[in-house]
Amino acid sequence: MSIVAGTYEVSEALSVEQLLDRLQEVLRSPASGTITVSSANGAPIGSLRFKLGRLFWATGGQHRWRRWSRLTKQLGLQLEGVNPPTVTSEGDWEYQVLAAGLNQRKISQEQAVALLEQTILESLFDIIQGSQGGCKFSSTMVSDSMTELLAVQNGLALLNQAQEQWQAWQAAGLSDSSPDAAPVVRNAAALQQRTSPQTYQTLTNLLNGESTLRELAVVMRQDLKMLTQTLLAYAQWELIGLETLADIERPGRQGATASQAERGIAAPPNSGTSPPGASDSPLIMCIDDNPKVCEMLEKILTSAGYQYVGVQDSLQALPVLLERKPDFIFLDLVMPVASGYEVCSQIRRISSFKDIPVVILTGNDGIIDRIRSKASGSTDFISKPLDVAKVLATIRHYIPDRVPNAA
C-alpha cells in the first residue's frame, strides 16, 4: 500500500492477517489520517485515527458509549460536566472531552493516556474479532498537522497486545463469544440446584441481561477470559444464555441508561474468616464443595496460626483467588460445574500464580487421578479423610519460610 495523501480503499475482502499487515505498515510510517474497517458486506467494524504514525483514538465493536462509561469509571476519571469548546463531528466527541478535561486539569496526563490505551486496545481486539470472516479496508491520508496531540507512544505494541489477547481468546475456545454479550439466567430452578445459595444469589443478581461480560469482569474483579469460560460452562447446561445488548445513550443525552455494572453493584463478598491484611501469617485457601471439609480445614489452620479462606463453589474460586492472593491452595478434585483439574489449569494460566503450591484433596487416591492432577499443574496430593499432622506437614514442606509463630 502506498501511504500518500488521499483516499485508499480495498474492494476485495482481506483476511485478518492481511489487515494486520496493513495496520502495521501504517503505524511504522509517518502517516496521518483515518483507517476504517468494515465487514465483507459493508457493515462497520471499527476505525483508527493516527497522526505521524501515532494512534490517538480508535473505535470498535458495538458498545462505543458503554466502553466510555465503563472505562472512565474504572480509571477514576472525573469528566462529568466537561464540555469541549467545539465538536466538529460525533466521531470527535470522546477525544475532545478527554482533551478538554486535560486542559481544565480535571484529569492528569497519565489518566488520559491510560484511557486512550485501554480504549484503543479493546477496539483493536473487537476489530480483529469482527474481521474473522473477511473485511474491507479504507483509509484517508492527510498531509496537514496538528499543533497539539494526545496520543499513545507505541501503537504497534498495542496492536501486538490485541493480537495476543485474541489468540488467547481463540485458544480458550471463545472465538464465537463476544465480550460484549450479556449473560442471562435461563433456568433458575436448575441453577439453584447446582450452586450454593451464595453463588445462586450472586448469579441471579448479576446475570439479568443488563450487563456485558466486560462489565461483569470489572464488577466481579475477575479476568475476562476466565469469567467467560466459567459462564460458558453453565451455558452448556442451558442454565444461562448470552444475549446481544444494545449500547447506552451518549453521556449527557436525555434518556441515557446505565447498566447494572455501571450503577456500581458491589462485588461478591469475601469468603473466609480472615480479612485481607489482618495478619502477616500465610493465607491458606481451600476450594471444596463439601462444607464439612472446609470447616475441618479452617479449624486445623486457624489453630495453627494460619489465615484461612474457604470457597465452596468453583465459580467463585478465581475471583476470590485474584482478590485474596493466598500463599497455598487445597483443591478438591470432584466438584460440580468445574472439576479440580479444570480449576488447577485455570490457576496455572495466571502468571502470578504459576508457582503457588496447589495440593489436591481426593477420596480416590488412584494412579489415574495422580497423573491427571500432575498434568493440570498440581503440586501434590492428600487423601481424604484429612489427617491433621499430614495437612500441616504438607504446608510446611512447600512454604517452609512462612510458618506462623503459633505453629
Image (cartoon, rainbow, N blue to C red):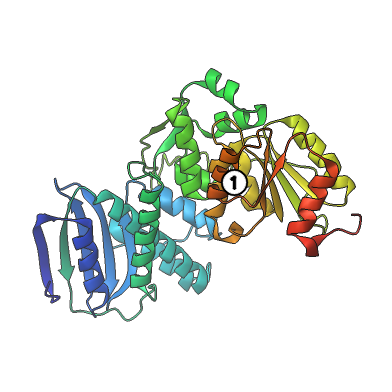
Residue 48 x, y percent position in the rendering:
28, 63
Total numbered labels: 1
Quadrant of the snapshot with the C terminus: bottom right
For disc 1, the marked residue is: 318
**Residue 312 picture location, percent across and down:** 68, 35
- Which image quadrant for residue 140? bottom left
Residue at the far top: name it.
189
Left or right of residue 162: residue 201: right
Question: Dot 1 lies on which element?
Answer: helix
Q: Nearer the viewer, residue 132 or 386?
A: 386
The amino acid beneath tag 1 is: Leu
Q: Who is closer to the viewer here, 329 or 170?
A: 329
- The residue at 54%/32% (across/down) is 337
Q: Is residue 17 left or right of residue 181?
A: left
Quadrant showing the N terminus: bottom left
Q: Residue furthest left?
A: 11
In the depicted structure, whether residue 261 falls above or below residue 118: above
> In the figure, 65 relative to 186: above or below?
below
Specify whether residue 220 is in view: no
Q: Residue at (22%, 60%) from the top-left corner?
A: 17
Q: What is the residue that sits farthest to the front in this orientation?
A: 367
- Residue 122 lies in quadrant: bottom left
Q: Looking at the image, is 207 positioned above or below residue 125?
A: above
Q: Nearer the viewer, residue 116 or 248?
A: 116
Residue for point 37% across, 64% down: 95
Percent coordinates x, y for residue 270 in the rendering: 70, 43
**Mark 1 crowdedness (10 Å alpha carbons): few <14, some 14-19, many ≥20:** many
